[in-house]
Amino acid sequence: MSPRPRIVVVGGVATDYLVRGPSLPEPGGSAEGGIFQEALGGKGANGAVAAVRLGADATLVARVGTDRRGLEQLASLEREGVALESVASDTEAPSGAVLVMVDGGGRKQTFSAPGANHRLSIRDVLRNAERIAAANVLLVQLEVPLDVVQAAVRLARAAGMRVVLDPAPARPLPEVLLEDVHVIRPNAKEARALTGISVRDRASARRAARNLLMRGVGAAIIAAPGGSLLVSGEQEAWLPELPVDSVDSTGAGDAFSAALAVALAESQPLLAAARFAQAAAAIATTRVGAQAGLPYRDEVLGLLSDVGLDVRPAPP
């Protein structure tokens, strides 16, 4: 039996408070919803949980408060099997929280209070240098300070690891960081923040991807209407949206990035890894809530088989 791939996630942890209703409120207005959920969230936590569900060992480098929500966040992560030795408790800031609103078409709005996430430090990363270096892939997002992300990426590259970047929330990024990223996965809003290019179709997605490759990224997978475009120095491939009944896009990007990291950690070719990730993201949209939507490995492989792709990363 092959060893389980090892993923380190550096990112945010939060409690998600989600309401789903027919329509989103207008500015200054209100709307009535029908479903309420309170659950573990944050892109770092979601990525770590998704990696475990997809067959990897996942270590999370993060920071939570010592409040009730922080204790509940740690308990939830522990139940999911995420390694917590690298999660620090912060006595000076509350645990992160996110308000999420989702309409009947799956569109969403979010409002976050980062709390302890913004107090994750370079020292936290350096304290976990050995754990980071022992992994196969580093998965990072942008819910924690940028200098912390850069420090983690430098450690990973020095150890010969692959780096997957989910560039959310959207913001411009320095060239020195992009040069160390193996695969970046922006949606249209994030691609515009990174490149200035509005992604409206496959052609504009290609321009955005080429912009990122010219700036040092190894490969880019750009979300566009109807699917995602993968572009690297060696190949280009269009990944169409898979046929599922989508109800909520919350957490789909987290599922995609985590699945991509897991498949790459299993030494899968980039295109196979991207297809695995596309299926994971599709399943995540079929359930309300980020955590509830994160898929398990058998579900992803089942969907790929149903659509005739049958991409099977090596079992752990």
Image (spheres, rainbow, N blue to C red):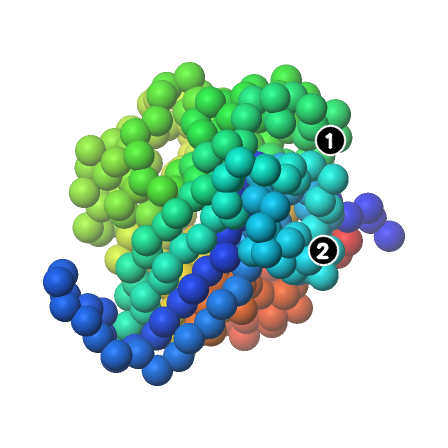
Q: Earlier in the sequence, mark 1 or mark 2?
A: 2
Asked if residue 234 shows in the view, the reply is no
Does 179 appear above or below 307? Answer: above
Q: Residues within 10 Å of mark 1 (few under 14, many from 20)?
A: some
Tell me how far mark 1 sits from mark 2, CA to CA.
Answer: 18 Å
Horizontal and vertical percent position of residue 43 = 49, 48
Asked if residue 21 shows in the view, the reply is yes
Disc 2 on helix, strand or loop?
helix
Query: Number of marks in the image?
Result: 2
Horizontal and vertical percent position of residue 95 = 52, 47
Amino acid marked by disc 1: Arg
| Residue 229's disc number | none
State which quadrant residue 235 falls in. Answer: top left
Residue at 54%, 74% (x, y): give it.
306
Residue at 27%, 47% (x, y): give it.
188
Q: Is residue 230 left or right of residue 293?
A: left
Disc 2 marks which residue? 78
Most distant residue in the bottom direction: 34
Residue nearer the viewer, 190 or 305: 190
Residue at 21%, 75% (x, y): give it.
31
Horizontal and vertical percent position of residue 246 = 38, 73
Does 136 appear above or below 250? Answer: above
Most distant residue in the right direction: 1
Disc 1 marks which residue? 131
Residue nearer the viewer, 28 or 57: 28
Q: Residues within 10 Å of mark 2 (few under 14, many from 20)?
A: few
Disc 1 on helix, strand or loop?
helix
Residue at 46%, 72% (x, y): give it.
37
Amino acid marked by disc 2: Glu
Does 22 appear above or below 55? Answer: below
Horizontal and vertical percent position of residue 189 = 26, 45
